[in-house]
């Protein structure tokens, strides 16, 4: 007979003890999130004009913070009429572009990331070239040198 151990954890949101199965929140908080998602989705389905998070919060009797947290986790990605505030500057952003930062902050962020990515990719390319040249100098891989017991390719040292 096999016994499984269950983890007991404190809920990240309310602090209540619960048996942890897959998430970081207790079943009550999860149920509350699901109700919030359902209410927000029903409201967004009913309207075609852009709606700010604060309006949605007041109409659904939930907090704007909870709606923004769920939106950041991708719960409302299909709805293009939800307007959230930019993560960096607080400007109103329409989620139709699939992101929750404004165009200015997005451009600044891309400008900061591009040099880092360029340095990383050049280092990776140089590292790959060095490894390739070392591999060709030290060893050679041949199809004729298969290990008879395993059938895998073996390395033949270049002399």
Image (cartoon, rainbow, N blue to C red):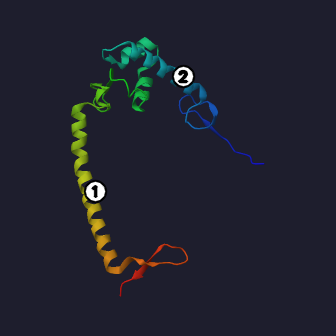
Q: Nearer the viewer, residue 49 or 28?
A: 49
Residue occupied by mark 2: 32
- CA gap, disc 1 to disc 2? 43 Å
Residue at left offset 21%, top offset 38%: 107
* Percent coordinates x, y for residue 108 in the rendering: 22, 39
Residue that lies at the very extreme toward the bottom in this rendered image? 159
Mark 2 packing: few (<14 Cα in 10 Å), some, or many (20+)? few
* Percent coordinates x, y for residue 128 in the rendering: 30, 66
Residue occupied by mark 1: 120
Dividing the picture into quadrants, the one containing residue 70 is top left
In the image, is 22 to the left or to the right of 96?
right
Residue at left offset 48%, top offset 72%: 152
Dividing the picture into quadrants, the one containing residue 101 is top left
Which disc, if any, is residue 12?
none
Q: Nearer the viewer, residue 2 or 91?
A: 2
Dividing the picture into quadrants, the one containing residue 142 is bottom left
Taking 120 as reference, is 32 above or below it?
Answer: above
Q: Secondary structure at mark 1?
A: helix
> Are the residues tagged 1 and 2 within 8 Å (C-beta)?
no
* Percent coordinates x, y for residue 132 in the rendering: 31, 71
In the image, is 39 to the left or to the right of 79?
right
* Percent coordinates x, y for residue 9 in the rendering: 61, 38
Instruction: Give the quarter of the figure containing the C terminus.
Output: bottom left
Q: Secondary structure at mark 2?
A: helix
Residue at left offset 27%, top offset 62%: 125
């Amino acid at each position: 007979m096999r016994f499984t151990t269950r983890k007991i954890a404190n809920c990240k949101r309310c602090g209540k003890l619960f048996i942890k199965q897959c998430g970081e929140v207790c079943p009550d908080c999860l149920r509350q999130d699901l109700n919030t998602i359902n209410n927000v989705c029903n409201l967004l389905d009913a309207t075609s004009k852009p709606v700010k998070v604060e309006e949605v919060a007041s109409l659904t009797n939930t907090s704007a913070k909870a709606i923004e947290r769920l939106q950041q986790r991708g719960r409302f990605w299909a709805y293009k009429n939800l307007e959230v505030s930019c993560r960096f500057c607080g400007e109103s952003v329409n989620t139709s572009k699939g992101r929750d930062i404004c165009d200015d902050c997005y451009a600044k962020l891309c400008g900061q990331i591009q040099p880092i990515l360029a340095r990383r990719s050049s280092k990776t390319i140089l590292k790959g070239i060095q490894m390739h040249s070392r591999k060709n100098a030290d060893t050679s891989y041949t199809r004729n040198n298969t290990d008879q017991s395993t059938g895998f390719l073996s390395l033949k040292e270049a002399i």
